[in-house]
C-alpha cells in the first residue's frame, strides 16, 4: 500500500523537535504509479530493497543523517524491504520500529490455509509451484535470512486480532533474531564493548491490522515508540509544547 502522508500528531511533534522525516518511495509502492509498483512484484522484489538502501546512502551523503542517527519505521508489507536490508547491512541504521510487520514471506506463501496466501501469491510469487519463485523469496525473506551479527535495536508491535499478518510469524522472527544476536556476542567476545541491541516485542490483545481499536492503547503505543526512538538514538525526550498566549 502507499505510504501514509496524512498529518499525524506524532510526526508533527518530531518535526518540532528538529527531526528530519524522509519518506522512501521505493519500487513496489504505488506513490509513482502502477508501473512503479509493478517493477517490484514477484521476481522484482529485490528492487525495493535496493531502492531503500539507495535512499539511506543519499541521506547520509547529503549530511542529513548518519547511521548512528538513522531509524527506519514501516508497517505491514513495508517491513519486508526493511527487514531484508537489516539482514544485509545492519550498520546502516541504529533503530527500527515495525507495526503489524509481515516478516515471514516464505512461510506465509507456503501455507494455503492462511486467508490471503492464494491472493498474495500474485504479489510475492508461488514458492510451492515455482522453484524460481521459492529461491527468490528465500533470498530476501526477513525471517529466513537472519544471521549472527550486530543488529540495530528493534521495536516490533503486533496484534492478536490481526487477520492479515499471523502473530506466529512475528514471534518466530523475534525469537530467531534474539538467538542470532546472542550467538553473535558469544562468538565475538571482543565486541563486549559494543552496546547490545534492544529487542522489544509489544503485543496488543485484540486490535487489527491497522492498530489498536482503543484510543488509550493507541496513545500508549505511540508513547512507547517515541520513548524507544529517543532512547536508542541517544536523544533527550520530547518537551511538551508551549501553549500560545491568547
Image: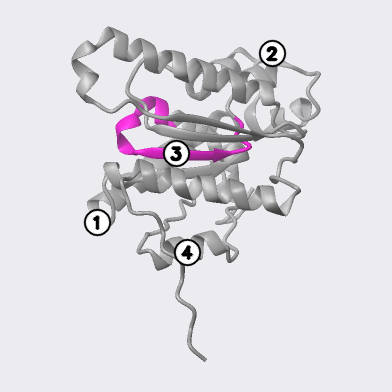
SS type, badge 2 = loop
Marks 4, 1: nearer the viewer: 4
Percent x, y of residue 9: 56, 64
N-term mark: 3 or 2 = 3
Seen in the picture, residue 242 relative to 180 is either above or below; the reply is: below
Q: Nearer the viewer, mark 4 or mark 3?
A: 4
- Say if 22 sits above or below 167 in the image: below
What kind of element bears circle 3?
A: strand
Q: Nearer the viewer, mark 2 or mark 4?
A: 4
**Is disc 4 placed on a helix, strand or loop?**
helix
Q: How is the image coloured?
A: one colour
Considering the numbered disc 1 on the image, is that residue within a helix, a strand or a loop? loop
Q: Write down the residue under mark 2.
A: 128
Q: Is residue 244 magenta?
A: no
Residue that label 3 marks: 96
Task: Kindly tell me whether residue 137 is visible in this rendering.
Answer: no
Inter-mark Cα distance, 4 to 3: 19 Å
Q: Which residue is mark 4?
A: 13
Q: How far is disc 3 from disc 2 in space, using C-alphas?
A: 31 Å
* Residue 101 among magenta residues: yes
C-alpha separation, residue under disc 4 versus residue under disc 1: 24 Å
Of the numbered discs 2 and 1, the one sitting upstream in the chain is: 1
Rendered location of residue 118, percent (x, y): 77, 26
Measured along the vertical axis of the image, is residue 134 above or below residue 90?
above
Can you tell which of label 1 and label 3 is closer to the viewer?
3
Query: Is residue 199 at all visible to an observer of this figure?
Result: yes
* Residue closer to the observer: 68 or 193: 193
Magenta stretch, residue numbers: 85-102
Q: Which residue is mark 1?
A: 62
Residue 225, above or below 101 = below
Amino acid at each position: 500500500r502507499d505510504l501514509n502522508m496524512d498529518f499525524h500528531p506524532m510526526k508533527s511533534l518530531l518535526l518540532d523537535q528538529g527531526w528530519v522525516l524522509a519518506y522512501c518511495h521505493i519500487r513496489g509502492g504505488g506513490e509513482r504509479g502502477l508501473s512503479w509498483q509493478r517493477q517490484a512484484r514477484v521476481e522484482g522484489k529485490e528492487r525495493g530493497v535496493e531502492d531503500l538502501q539507495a535512499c539511506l546512502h543519499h541521506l547520509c551523503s547529503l549530511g542529513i543523517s548518519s547511521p548512528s542517527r538513522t531509524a527506519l519505521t514501516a508497517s505491514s508489507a513495508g517491513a519486508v524491504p526493511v527487514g531484508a536490508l537489516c539482514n544485509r547491512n545492519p550498520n546502516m541504521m541504529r533503530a527500527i520500529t515495525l507495526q503489524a510487520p509481515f516478516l515471514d514471506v516464505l512461510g506465509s506463501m507456503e501455507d494455503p490455509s492462511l486467508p490471503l496466501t492464494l491472493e498474495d501469491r500474485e504479489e510475492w510469487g508461488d514458492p510451492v509451484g515455482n522453484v524460481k519463485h521459492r529461491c527468490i523469496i528465500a533470498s530476501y525473506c526477513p525471517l529466513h535470512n537472519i544471521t549472527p551479527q550486530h543488529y540495530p535495536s528493534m521495536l516490533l508491535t503486533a496484534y492478536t486480532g490481526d487477520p492479515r499478518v499471523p502473530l506466529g510469524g512475528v514471534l518466530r522472527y523475534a525469537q530467531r533474531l534474539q538467538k542470532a544476536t546472542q550467538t553473535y556476542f558469544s562468538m565475538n567476545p571482543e565486541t563486549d564493548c559494543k552496546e547490545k541491541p534492544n529487542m522489544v516485542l509489544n503485543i496488543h490483545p485484540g486490535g487489527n491490522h491497522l492498530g489498536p481499536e482503543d484510543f488509550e492503547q493507541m496513545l500508549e503505543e505511540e508513547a512507547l515508540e517515541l520513548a524507544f526512538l529517543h532512547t536508542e538514538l541517544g536523544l533527550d525526550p520530547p518537551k511538551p509544547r508551549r501553549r500560545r498566549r491568547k
